[in-house]
Image: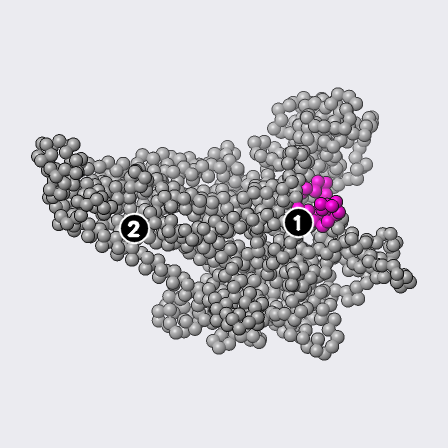
Amino acid sequence: MASRMIARVIVAPAGTTTYTSPPGPELAGVVEGSVVELHLDVAHDEYYRAEVLCHPEYYSQTTMEEIGWIAKNRLELANPLLAEYDYDANGDDELGFKQGETVFGFVEVDGWWEGYNPSNGQAGMFPGNYIKVLPKGAVAATVPRPAPAPAAVAAAAAPPEPFVPQALPMRMPQPSKFEETKTGPQTVGGAMVQNPMAGKAVQPAAKATAKGSDGKFDGVNEQQFAIWAHYQAYMCAFTAFFCGIYTVTWANGDGWKCEIEGKTISDIYILNKTACGGGNSTGRRLLDHHTCCTAGHCCDPTEFNDVDLWGSLEIGALSILMAFLIPIFENEDFGFGLWMPTTWWWYERRVSPHALVYFICAVINLGAFPSAFTAICLLICAYTYQYAFWRQEAGDGGRERRQVAKQRAAERKAKADKQEDGWPLDWYRTTPVYEAIFRPVSFYRKLVREDKLSIYAWTSFFVFLNLFQFFFALGVWVDLVNTVQEDMIDGKLKVGCSSEECKTNRGRIEYGFVSDVGPLAKACGACLNLNCALIVMPVTKLLLARLNNLGNSYNSQNASANIFSQWFARCCAGPFTRYVPLSKNIEFHKLIAYFIFVFAWGHTIFHFANYELASVGTLHTFEKFGWGGTTFLTGFFILLSMFFIYTAALNRVKRAMYEVFFYNHHWFIVFFFMLLLHGPVFWAWSLIPLLLYITERVLQQLRGQRAFLVTRVEWVKPVLAVKICPLDRSSFIFREGQYLYLNCPYINKNEWHPFTISSARGDLSIPGGPSNPLRVAIDTGEEVMEVPRPAGLDKKYRWAKYCPVSADYNKMNDWEFLDKHETCYHDYVSVHIKVHGLNDPVARSWTRKLKEYIELMSPGQSFPYHFSSRDSRGDLMLGRRFGVDNQPILRVDGPHSAPAEHYLNYKTVMVIGAGIGMTPCASVLSAMLKYRWRFGQPPEKLHFYWIVQHGEVDAFQWFLHLITELEHIHFKQRSGATTDEARADWRRYYCEINMYVTRAPKEKKAVPPMVSAPKFIPPSETLPPRFTVDQLYAEMYNPSVSSRKQVETMSTAKDASNRLQDVWVWNGRPDWDQVFANMARGAVDPDIGVFFCGAAVIGADLQTMCQKHSINGGVAFSLHKENF
């Protein structure tokens, strides 16, 4: 019988180009994903003779007997697999089989195979721990044909005892046929490029399910837009309350009756109907005549008596009721907020019940003018919820996680209550407010000791500035309103001249003026002028960089240049950087945003009240461009832009999907444009800040035009390590701890994302600094070393040969060596990017799109990717600038200042990182151990702490390699000190690296092999490393010593089992109280810098520890934190 093989169609042959014509009729009726059998008995160089077995589920073609020729480069060959146990399909997209059957797998992702079972003629997913991979030739020569009408697979029996397959993560459902996919050939820059993921089921990494949830919250996508819609609903409730109140009050609005607080204005301003021709209304309009009223400019008490403000008592009441019901409905404990199980009828049909509820509420609110804004917000919320359900997002909103947290908190409280004699009624004595009022001297000393004086001082100044602006504007407008009202009652208003003042007064007589509530609205508006002008300043990176570098540049470089520089460094530069908390720029940006929110709604609420009391006068007073409704329209768009910005700026929304935050923040363009139209003097307030910000954005684009080469990309799930190098190194001078922005034009030319630099300054060999000694082969990227000159070689011959560090040059021939021009120094700037959205069936996050784009440039290859290119002369050079679309692969904006860069100001530093937050810590660690200590530069004592979950250790294998390499370098540098003086210098430097593994299993597990191979140590190395990366990985995988015993172990057991040179590995979270107390006892320097990057909850603990262990007159811990 003819020999056959299984394959899957990657791209349907229709419309494709091949080098030769097929030897016979082409295979018709197949699409991407169709499974075919290959007839290997008919040979051809470029084609297979194939027969169709099955089509994808979404394809309507039902014929299964097509036979024809198909190009080899359009097929993906299958791997033969042996079913060791029965497996029953749990869904339509899964594949079942019986023990002993041969199935064929195409690709394996996260433990799940996608394949085809010839016994039942079906294709789908199945777990990899039920099968065994066979050699290519082990499968039977003939593949059985499926039955004409295959019946459903019978329920499979459980795996035989005693074997229980290892639990695999829950697999996500297949993407819908209506979803956008990234498979098949793509046209990039006019060229057809084959996607390396084409034809492969990019199954998402399994995500954890809540305990006991049975996977009912494992949807196609995690909750992302649903979280945004959830907070939109809360904002809708807020607007519904206030808009509902004024919908009620506007049902009976007051017009202009020529009265002020019950007092009629002067008779000289009242219309005299008899004098105007028996009440002829045209007489009132002849204001230049003196026949209608004594003053010649009249107020008609009857013209604006009845005013319809488009309010509604019923709709307003319903809107207020919604304001109370929406938070109950959205509650995440007892309501329906973020409750989105996959077992819902709504989930299966992609219809959102939340959207239906809010759509009905929106229709109701559309019936009145004040509540119309609430209606628009509700429609937006409904649309967002519906889009989340259309994406099949699922989740419980963190209910189970919060329940566990509450139980743990209750246990801790119960434990604490047992240790307390009674309820601590004096808890308020420890609050900052109480200390500032009743113990100001000690509070001041505490702020100085904790280095918080500048933060409190600038915050207090900012609050005072807003209060001053508010009451100053309030006083001006109260005086104006009172003066106008008194003059109108007394008949003293100037109306007879041709000046602008008289013209304004004539309008006030005819239409009235604002009410007594108006000054409150104007006072809020004045504060908005101040805050809206200031809000762009903290995020203007150009200004921040200049201010951040001001003190450091003079202190480190120019202090000894001349007398003026010395004086400036002592009197100006140092105090500026110390007493202006530039590192808190984002916190200040958020603080201003809070003030804007309060004053914007205060401005709106007071103006709504003012409009109710003086609608005609308000419209006339604030008329713009000849239309009184201008302020309503511009104000509407200002509040609408705030609705998008504020709801998408919450940390929970930002972490769920950064793109939601990024794109909605660009509503600031509408916000400022409408402010310029809305506020009469805002242009003067915002002129300088907006010009600075616009200049910054222009410079960002210009900085993004600098040429950067991508040299190497590594991938260890879920972290993508990217190494880049500027063509002009002098244009990118950075310090450890700083960050940069990356833009990938292929994804979006306007989307920039911040990433912390993880390499040291010396790795780039910046002019004037240390040089990176790393040398690599240009064509392969492999590290090389210099081959010693042969002893018998004649001196007249030059010798500059290199070989890979993985090779033994003693066993190589001369012609195998690399010439110097075939190698180069590998100078680089590295960033480590955590890729999000791996669970999504298609790439939606920017980080995942970047990873797939990198893969697109290296088809058929596997990580790590090394890039090289040809220069203008055709010579091979390290790195690649342009991608497959002839655009720069990456554009770089930076560097930008960050808190960690100030580590140079201390002699003793505590560098703390959590998870991926250790990237700035890696930069500092590399700088100190590789470069700074080698040249005798501070800091002198380094205490490094890293907290990582056990399940994430594999993702940070690159960091374990870095730690091992740095420790080896440090060991060689210390060992190289041969004189007493040199050894004494090295004794000044102290390094301690503590690595905490949380959630480690109680029982030891077998250590799997590392994904990335350890760095090869050449045979010529005279000082081998004290430990290997495999040893460190094994200790991290099974940490043996509890972190509670850290101080005891480190003080008594110098050769502890968890110690590898300067590295200590601990099981559990760090006991910060114990760590800081030990640091304070052994402190040599009075100031200790604490630098942290990670979750805010850990930052709060460190803040408490710094306050607690800072001693008056002794050691002071200064915290510099960067939360993500």
Give above or below for 408 relative to 341: below
Q: Is residue 1035 above or below residue 488?
A: below
Q: Would you say 575 lies left or right of 861 here?
A: left
Residue at the spot of label 1: 709
Magenta residue span: 854-881
The amino acid type, in three-letter code, at marker 2 is: Lys
Q: Residues within 10 Å of mark 2 (few under 14, many from 20)?
A: many
* Residue 721 locus on image (x, y percent): 65, 51
Q: Residue 102 lies in magenta, yes or no?
A: no
- Mark 1 is on which residue type? Leu
Image location of residue 203, percent across then percent down:
63, 40
Magenta-highlighted stretch: main secondary structure?
Answer: loop
Q: Which mark is residue 522?
A: 2
Q: Can I make out residue 332 in this image?
A: yes
Q: Residue at x 51, y 49 (%)?
A: 697
Residue 1002 picture quarter:
bottom right
Which residue is located at x 19 percent, y 37 percent?
304
Task: Give the image location of residue 350, x and y in percent.
Answer: 50, 34
Residue 1034 in percent (x, y) is at: 70, 59
In contact (CB < 8 Å): disc 2 and disc 1: no
